[in-house]
Amino acid sequence: MRAAEERAIAAGTPVETLMERAGASLAEAAFRFAGPMNALVVCGPGNNGGDGYVAARYLATRGVPVRVAALADPATETARWARSRWQGPVESFDSAGPAPLLIDCLFGTGLRRGLEHAVAERLSALSRAAQLTVACDLPSGVEADSGACLSPVPSCDLTITFGALKPAHRLMPALPHMGRVVLADIGVAAEDRWFELGQPALPPLAPDAHKYSRGLVHALAGKMPGAIALAASAAARSGAGYVRVSTSRPIDHLPAAVVQTDTALLTDPRIGCILVGPGMGDLPQVLTLALTSPAPKVIDADAIGQVGEPERLKSQDAILTPHEGEFGRLFGDLPGSKPERALAAAARSGAVVVYKGADTLVAAPDGRLGFAPPAPAWLATAGTGDVLAGIIAALRARGLPSFEAACAGVWLHGRAAERAGPGMIADDLLAALPHLL
């Protein structure tokens, strides 16, 4: 976003114009959210503070009783310009009294170190005393690229950001502090190789479709049949035309439509995706068997720990779905932020990597990176990862490329959890999937 702003300025858009648009958008969003509530805008010395002075001016023209408090005098030319256009008084941040609506414009995307203790304490006190807290671009104390909380961060009800989301809006530990996130268009277009996952375009069903053309998923069972039953059921519920499970013993709780068979059928050229890992246990030969097939594959759960060297997957058309622990066991202690680690893992393995967690990322070896929108916390229950693996396998078998299948699967998984509700168990996701499709 910084690079995009620099390009816009170099092309002739005055930086004051960008600040005016940002401040006007901040005021508009805050007004729609809170109404004509008495407001306190706290401004820092940089351009985030400049946005605050502009927002205060626009709120005042809407009839909102608004006060401005400054942490320090403006330190940039543009912020000084914005302050000069604010006609009201400017209080000291240290002594300003609270207001029902607090608008935090202290620090934004440029922050590299935590707030001083006294400043953080004062901001937290003003936020606690307010009925609603709104952040300009990011809550003060958040590092924009990594999502780190560099000092105590107040929990906001609304965050307005400009031009494009920043990584911190969708990364832990900052994510819970954002509240509702609103994106304002200020006429600056950022690159889109990093993006938030949205509703996917799923493959349409052809009028002459049959079970094989709709996608055949072949799953490999292991020691724990319940996990592969969840994954295979999810594949069937996600639109695969045919789902088979290789198993040496009958598996209960599988839909009758899911065929239980042996491993001989792995040579079937009609297989659209192999699913391996859920419930596999310590059976590395199961993964080895899967890797002998040229078919695309989803490698999940126990199979991730059996890969060994990530470079082993370079010759495979594979999607990996590790959570934090599995990621560390396969790739080691990679440096950098979670997005940087995800992209490094994808480049090293040649696989699409679904780096799971409260802030799931989907990374492609070519540098594309999808950020999951917030999903319900109640997804943190046993078996939901197996369901996700099954969804992704079905979408890959149906013809979506690996990265697009993984992105679509993550989006559907989160929305299925929303539909299932807070009392859900993993099995309930299966019932929600057909409604979403």
Image (cartoon, rainbow, N blue to C red):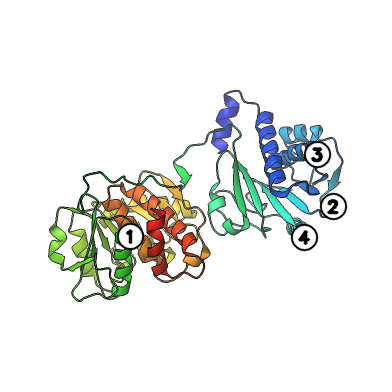
Q: Amino acid at mark 3?
A: Ala
Q: Nearer the viewer, mark 4 or mark 1?
A: 1
- Asked whether 295 or 35 is in front, the reply is 35
Image mark count: 4
In this picture, residue 13 sits left or right of residue 93 = left
Residue pointed to by mark 4 = 125
The span from disc 3 to disc 1 (Cα, nearest Å) is 54 Å
Residue pointed to by mark 2 = 96
Q: Amino acid at mark 4?
A: Ala
Query: Pointer 4 and pointer 2: residues touching (CB < 8 Å)?
Result: no
Query: Pointer 2 and pointer 3: residues touching (CB < 8 Å)?
Result: no
Q: Amino acid at mark 1?
A: Arg
The span from disc 4 to disc 2 (Cα, nearest Å) is 11 Å
The span from disc 2 to disc 3 (Cα, nearest Å) is 18 Å
Q: Quadrant of residue 90?
A: top right
Residue 43 shows in this picture: yes
Q: Earlier in the sequence, mark 4 or mark 1?
A: 4
Label number found at residue 237: 1
- Asked whether 396 or 191 is in front, the reply is 396
Does residue 19 sit above or below 45 in this rendering? above
The span from disc 2 to disc 1 (Cα, nearest Å) is 57 Å
Q: What is the crowding at mark 2: few (fewer than 14 residues within 10 Å), some, or many (at least 20)?
A: some
Residue pointed to by mark 3 = 60
Does residue 57 sit above or below 373 in this rendering? above
The span from disc 4 to disc 1 (Cα, nearest Å) is 49 Å
Q: Earlier in the sequence, mark 3 or mark 1?
A: 3
In this picture, residue 137 sits left or right of residue 288 = right
Q: Position of residue 153 (x, y in %)?
A: 67, 58
